[in-house]
Amino acid sequence: MSMWIRLLVVIELVIGYGVVFYMWILGVIALPLVLFTMFLGVGFSALPLVFAVIFGGFALWGVMQLVMKIFDPAFNIADIKVIRFYLCLGLSAFAIFIEYVKFNLSYSFVIFGPPLFVTAHLIYLERRNVLKAS
């Protein structure tokens, strides 16, 4: 893969995942406070957000592994089944967050549309491994 195509994929990742990554970082920063208040007895109403942050972290790790497989097919961090599982966790994180925050559908599409399209494009680029029967 040429250097220019790699650069375009990295730019696509930055643009597509910028907002979602920022939201995930804010969730990671707020996670200790949320866990602290949950264990003080305030309630477990924020538990879905805890799962969304955890699932989102796995999903971001899965996307990074998928990008590394696109750049170098011999690069092996995880089995492709694990990467598919991580990407499914990302969809779960999106669903949990949208349901918890009660976003309007248009806001959800503006925030979560670009990462979904970028992920679909990455899956397309690595389709010979990702979509093969396992």
Image (cartoon, rainbow, N blue to C red):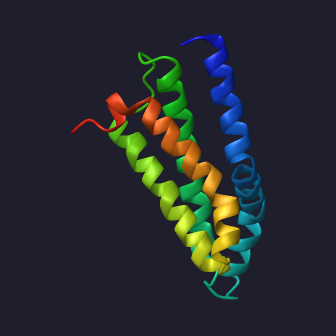
Task: Name the spot of residue 68 as percent of width and height, x first.
Answer: 53, 25
| 51 or 6, nearer to the observer | 6
Image quarter (top left, top right, bottom left or bottom right) of the C terminus = top left
* Residue 39 at least partly seen: no
Q: From this viewpoint, which residue is outermost toward the bottom?
A: 42
* Residue 128 at least partly seen: yes
Task: Name the spot of residue 100 as percent of width and height, x first.
Answer: 62, 78
Residue that appears at 57% across and 58% down: 54
- Quarter of the image where one finds residue 97: bottom right
Whether residue 46 is situated above or below residue 1 in the rendered picture: below
Residue that appears at 33% across and 41% down: 81
- Quarter of the image where one finds residue 30: bottom right
Tell me if 76 is positioned left or right of 22 in this view.
Answer: left
Residue that appears at 53% across and 49% down: 59
- Quarter of the image where one finds residue 13: top right
| 124 or 32, nearer to the observer | 124
| 36 or 85, nearer to the observer | 85
Q: From this viewpoint, which residue is outermost toward the top?
A: 2
Q: From this viewpoint, which residue is outermost toward the left?
A: 133
Residue that appears at 74% across and 46% down: 18
Task: Name the spot of residue 99 as percent of width and height, x first.
Answer: 58, 78
Whether residue 115 is situated above or below residue 78 in the rendered picture: below
| 43 or 121, nearer to the observer | 121
Total labels: the figure holds 0
